[in-house]
Image: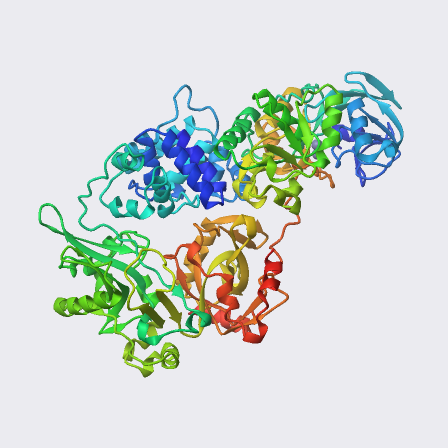
Amino acid sequence: MIRFARLLDRLSFEPRRSAKLALMREHFIETPDPERGLALAALTGGLSFRHAKPAMLRALVAERVDPHLFALSYDFVGDLSETIALIWPNGEGGDASPPALQEVVARLETARRGEVPALIAGWLDTLDETGRWALLKLVTGGLRVGVSARLAKTAVAGLGSLQPDDIEEVWHGLDPPYETLFAWALGTGERPRSDDPVPFRPPMLAHPAEDRDLDDFAPAEFAAEWKWDGIRVQAAAGYDGSGALRRRLYSRTGEDLSAAFPDLVAALDVEAVIDGELLVVIDGEVRSFNTLQQRLNRKSVTAKLMASHPAAIRAYDLLSLDGEDLRDLPFRDRRARLEDFVARLASPRIDLSPLVEVAGLEELAQARNAPETLHAGADAQAIEGLMLKRWASSYVPGRPKGQWFKWKRDPHRIDAVLMYAQRGHGKRSSFYSDYTFGVWREAGEAGEELVPVGKAYFGFTDEELAEIDRFVRQNTVNRFGPVREVRHDTEVGLVLEIAFEGLNRSTRHKSGVAMRFPRVARLRFDKPPAEADRIETLEALLPADERAPASLRKTRAG
Amino acid sequence: MTLGADLLTLTDEGLYCPQGGFHIDPTRPVERALITHGHADHARAGHGAVLASDETLKIMAVRYGEGFTGMRQRADAGETLDINGVLVSFHPAGHVLGSMQIRLERGATRVVVSGDYKRQADPTCAPFEPVACDVFITEATFGLPVFRHPEARDEIAKLLASLQTFAGRTHLVGAYALGKAQRVIAELRAAGYDRTIYLHGALEKLCRLYEAEGVDLGPLETVGRRSKELAGEVVLCPPGQLADRWARRFGDPVTAIASGWVRVRARARQRGAELPLVISDHADWDDLRATIKETGAGEVWVTHGAEEALVHWCRGEGLAARPLNLIGYGDDGEAELDAGAAIPDGVPAGETTERETMAGKAAGG
Ligand SMILES: [Zn+2]
Ligand SMILES: [Zn+2]
């Protein structure tokens, strides 16, 4: 627990991806099994004990600390777990030694609800400030140290000569404490025999299309599809050793969504791996992203919700069929297999994302902004724009250059990261409802930084407001009067999809641009902040005569 | 009227002893000043006469030049002076080199003004000496129970571990020029680190003064024109330089900050600490309370920081206590640096119209 606490402590302050990787690698090398594997499980969200609630922690600390002093301290520190970690009396544990991570995990997994407070209090008594902070992070279920599951797996891969995607491919067949995985990564063991018939296959991603990408666009070389306003998923089904068909629904980051979508999982009754868009479809019509969102972020789902919000997949690629890996085939061939497959499947829950058959760029540009004039019909409002995929492209994980483009329709939308939130007025005075958001830009030696590009205070529903407010309170790093700065780094942050009507150059603003009519189009809790947009995306939207020469931009950024 | 009010009153310049005709740590130039220690918020230039420890006088001369005061008088620890019928003596405070508490006695009343102090061991200055009194005027920079400083050697161990993990990167440590920098160096030496330690120019004079006063700091050199060749070395600079252009010369340094404030994560992040070193020259919550009890004082005036919590605790212990809102202190690098902080400039407001209408609609819908 002490080593793990030290690791979390260092990670929480370290902004550099490479340094985070170094810290994790060092930990994995120096820490024996099973402690390192449990640390990996904690970092990848793979521990499954019941989490402690803030109310319980408050009650624990109230037994030991003067409430007025606690209140003053909490007000100063701003974070409940941290306040408790710092204020907890020292030296109450006598000679008892601090628990190993293994003990904490094992006891919490088997403890009955009533036993948890005494367990936690006992451990807090034996730990120091940093240890208590780490323990409380662990038991409340939110490490928030700026490490994604992907980054932790990348660190494991870096122990030897594996690639992160090698880890992804065996990951879902493994369980904590991952002893065979570490042995493989360190070169002392074989590749873990994956009994998992449905591993996650890292997805191929598209580049945002900017005007210059399309300057020498050859329509004959590209397939055009609608870009649907849903969630990218991978639906996989395969036979395990005993001949049973196992099925799983993954998010594009490899998160297992199966439990939230049993209705959809049940529809996957053929051995295949589909890449497609998760949507809510009612009476054959795609519903808004907001409707879909009500089914996300859930560990389980009620029959009622499944009936009122039926989920479907609009398939656009086929990665594997009947045990045959299709990823090396060109998109043209995969598409043909996909069309055939979907037709044979004849499932109301899995349909085909249609191709947009137009002759030239001009028509594509029109289709992008007016999908309803083409064959999209009633679903047009669920279209975000176009996907352009090179017919010859094989399915390559990551974001290979020049293969796939996403070409969004107007209004302009960008994915920005929430940086600051300010309390509203009147009815909203208890909510953080005014948001300053930023996009990435290069920052010289420091790598990438977010630069604020706008403020938005509407566009969201009351429910979404409550969700953002919760996020703000749980991720505050600074307070300036009514303003809170929230975590906004590559790993942790809230991505807001911002819609806006246009953009102008502005000398008043650090970013050099000012948005017209920005509003929060939707919340992207599903999107890692590192994948939010970059300032270049915005600059490309500037009217041609307002684009500063590149040299000028550089000076400003420096 | 409280007990101590016979001896000390609060003026615009700070604490004043009418009978003795002197101020203690005045924030503006006065005729006669008694100075607890050399930090800029306590020791200002331009007084008519200054009474302070020998080291404090030397520190002031280094900082302000020899003409920092009209007249100067040296106060030796434990020696009693009679100033217009007030018995005055200086006693080590353990804060920085030459730091003193000031004890005043007149009639049956004994008052001790703590100045800044700490109880942790510090190889660079004389340890705090508890002085019995009736009224104790204590600082409370870290007067909240969340502040319990760890052992400095454990924090130094973190720095040494990082030097191993990130051996190719300069470790840039932000430390205040008077006291903290020398303590960090001395603790590094105590931990066996014997490589040359590099200094930002602003730290050099005071390090040399410490050495002249007999504090061994090992091999030191100023950074000068060096830059990337200091990869893997320890470089000390004032905290304000960490985010300055000057720091860019080191490429991709590990940014450490030695301060009690970095115990709180949000504050550490706000200051850009990647390696927070919780090393403070002020008493922490436990030591503040222990010291108050040790003095035997029945009355406590709390100043210089988080007064409310400590006053609350004193009252719970049956002690008369009051906050003393001295203004102008807390500028010694451990003070609140974020007082004037604000949201970064240049945040575009968006060119929206009908804000109230739209906001109301969103909230209602
Ligand atoms: Zn001081
Ligand atoms: Zn001070």
Inspect this view and state whether residue B23 appears.
Answer: yes
Question: B321 above or below A437?
Answer: above
Q: Position of residue A548 (x, y in %)?
A: 59, 68
> Residue most toward the left?
A243
Tell me how many marks there are.
0
**Pick the front one: A47 or A321:** A321
For ligand 1, give the image quadrant. Answer: top right
Q: Residue at x 19, y 60 (%)?
A: A263
Inspect this view and state whether residue A112 appears.
Answer: no
Q: Residue at x 53, y 55 (%)?
A: A442
Which quadrant of the rendered structure holds the N terminus of chain B?
A: top right
Which quadrant of the rendered structure holds the C terminus of chain B?
A: bottom left
Q: In the visual, does A327 lie left or right of B208?
A: left
**Pick the front one: B300 or B63:** B63
| Residue A462 placement: quadrant | bottom left
Q: In the visual, does A411 lie left or right of B248?
A: left
| Residue B69 placement: quadrant | top right
Q: In the visual, does A219 lie left or right of B77?
A: left
Q: Position of residue A308 (x, y in %)?
A: 24, 66
> Residue most toward the top?
B79
| Residue A512 placement: quadrant | bottom right
Q: Which colour assignment does the render follow? A: rainbow
**Pick the front one: A239 or B105:** A239
Q: In the visual, does A535 lie left or right of A376?
A: right
Q: Position of residue A336 (x, y in %)?
A: 19, 69
